[in-house]
Amino acid sequence: MKLSRAKRRERQHMNVLLGVMTIALPSKDDPLSLTDSYVPSATWRYFHLAGLRHGVKVIFFYPEDVDFEKERVHAWSCTSRDAKSGWKRRDYRFPDVVYENVALQSLRRTGALDVKRRFANLGIPTFNPALFQKSTMSSILKRNPEIADHLPKTVTVHRVEDILALLSKTKCVYLKPVRGSGGKGVIELSVNRRVVRVRAQRFFNNQPVDRTFPLEKLVEFLNRLICSERYIAQEGLKLLTREGRKIDFRFQLNRDETGEWQLVAIRPKLGPIGSVVSNLHSGGIEGDFDEIVDWAANEGYSFPDEDDLIHLAIETAKEFTRYRPNLSHIGIDIAVDVNGRFFVLDVNPRPGRNILTRPMIAASVDCITGFAKYLYKKSRKKSRPH
């Protein structure tokens, strides 16, 4: 299926139209869609304001709002300059670029995955792709020597022996579900004399667990575990810990209107007291980067140079861009140990905005909107006859 000549002409004589596919705004069946007083939350207002700055018209639609026969989309948009009024639903032509903003677990249920593919088949750039399972991401990063030096020892678990071998070397191992997020299902194994302590913050039914096993009973436990879930096993690190809270740092990176990666924010995460993980979903709290650096210095800890941390985060993002050219933003979790060494702990292809302040969210949204314009220009160059 190709766009008609009339539709192509219509696209060429209008500003860039960015379609944000999301289920965060009211659906067309919601009574709010019929009122003139509805105003969405700040994130969506930031998109409209960013569009005004970049010369991009931003519309918001559900997967079900797309009519591929009529080549129209029934979408929310805003007509005001301050985004505090003028929000209405109406029909639009197909967008020039589509930003898919539907949670991964909802892609199939909502039909978003099919809509995304059909837009791509029409030659309309789509972005915010999924990445890979944790085991694949680890393998990719190991191939880059510059990044590999900053990775904890990590193995893909095929057998219980894989876990035990790493545990015998490091005395502390973290098991992470290959499809996990938010700290759910992460398990800490730590050797204490002839027994192994097993802890998790969000285990079965999201409940914490703290048990001790002799080795033979641990093997039984691990066998049951890996039969129901796929894991990677990662070396446990002696991370900076403040008042019983483990610390790591979320580096929020976005590509902008140039297509280059930019640092949007560094946000420390401090886990619950005594917790295995630092994720906010598990009860962690946000911190301030400069304040944490000052605290580390006062406590006598070595702390890496900020530019070195940023460089590692950007190089990590660039590595994945080779496999996902339309990757637009990413969250890199970097941890610092008690000796000042720093490691990439995790990669979040769709980082949550809950950890960011409003100015950080606005900066990220501005980059996303600029990147949409970059993709549009890039697609136009490809479509021009040589």
Image: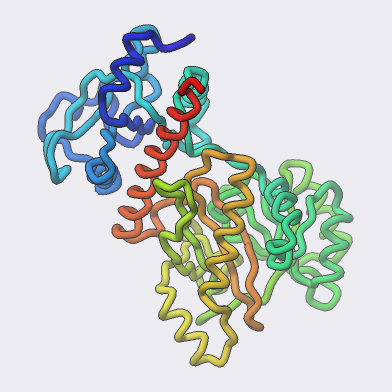
Q: Nearer the viewer, residue 180 or 199?
A: 180
Residue 251: x percent and y percent? 49, 62
Which residue is depicted at the point 40% across and 73% down? 288
Q: Is residue 119 left or right of residue 334?
A: left
Residue 346: x percent and y percent? 61, 57
Q: Is residue 182 left or right of residue 39?
A: right
Q: Is residue 150 left or right of residue 277?
A: right
Write down the quadrant of residue 211 in the picture. Answer: bottom right
Which residue is depicted at the point 27% across and 30% down? 15
Q: Nearer the viewer, residue 175 or 94?
A: 94
Above-or-below relation of 288 to 118: below
Above-or-below relation of 104 to 249: above
Above-or-below relation of 177 to 4: below
Residue 227: x percent and y percent? 78, 42
Q: Is residue 111 left or right of residue 11?
A: right
Which residue is depicted at the point 48% across and 67% down? 269
Q: Is residue 38 visible?
A: yes
Above-or-below relation of 13 to 277: above
Residue 356: x percent and y percent? 38, 59
